[in-house]
Image: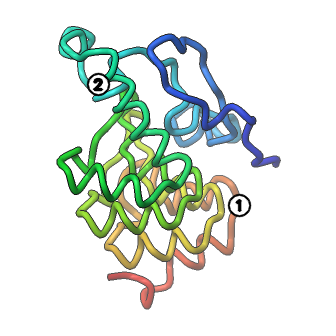
Amino acid sequence: MSQSTPDDAAADDTAADSTTRDSPAAEALAGHGHGAAPPAPGTSPTGPQEAAGESASAVADLTPEELAFLHGVFDAAREGRADELAEVVDKGVPVDLTNSSGDTLLVLAAYHQQHDAVRVLLERGADVERTNDRGQSALAAAVFRQDEAVVRTLLAAGADPERGPKSAVETARVFELPAMLALLQDPSLRA
């Protein structure tokens, strides 16, 4: 089973972007059956509401500059710009900021294999148990991407591999990832 992502999986989430960017994340994780692929974190159709996970009416109060800033924060998580994330969170951007799909900065950083960004967000109190609207956690995203370093970091921060119907353990089982399953089942790696 191929697990490569399309080149545009980390594309901007701009107000003008109304395309769907699919990736090989599991449709089984989204509750659509075994073996098919749902959208990856941050790849749903986007609109202005994505900038803050708010309704369109709440976002209507934001200026274009504010929207661009918030889109840049999501891009920083995807692209691993850890120093930038640290700076904006330290200045007041919520560490658990979500987009319109419920993806937190942590979910996006984990999916895009950005270890330093994951670490910075965890140091600032990111919720390791928070899931997006499809029930995907940062840990499940890291397991799917088979990123051992991010998986270890999230487990050490207290992420529960069994949490939720689309848990990290279920991800490892559905996609037949025995090395990831072994990591998840190793009690010495948990906080």
147 or 15, which lies in front?
A: 15
The percent position of residue 170, horizontal first and vertical second, equals 53, 56
The percent position of residue 190, horizontal first and vertical second, equals 38, 82
Left or right: 190 in relation to 79:
left
Q: Residue 176 got which mark?
A: 1
Task: Please state which amino acid type lies under the numbered disc 2.
Answer: Glu
The residue drawn where x is 72% and y is 41% is: 5
Closer to viewer: mark 1 or mark 2: 2
The residue drawn where x is 50% and y is 34% is: 42
- Looking at the picture, does residue 106 appear above or below residue 15? below
Callout 2 environment at 10 Å: few (<14), some (14 to 19), or many (20+)? few
**Is mark 1 in CB contact (under 8 Å) with mark 2?**
no
- Looking at the picture, does residue 103 appear above or below residue 107? above
Report the Cα–Cα distance between label 1 and label 2: 42 Å
Q: Residue 100 got which mark?
A: none
Asked which secondary structure carries label 1, the reply is loop
Task: Please state which amino acid type lies under the numbered disc 1.
Answer: Glu
Q: Which residue is mark 2?
A: 66
Q: Quadrant of the C terminus?
A: bottom left
36 or 48, which lies in front?
A: 48
- Looking at the picture, does residue 142 appear above or below residue 185? above
Q: Point out the residue furthest to the bottom here.
A: 188
The percent position of residue 111, horizontal first and vertical second, equals 55, 51
Image quarter for residue 63? top left
The residue drawn where x is 75% and y is 48% is: 3
Image quarter for residue 127? bottom left
The percent position of residue 18, horizontal first and vertical second, equals 54, 11
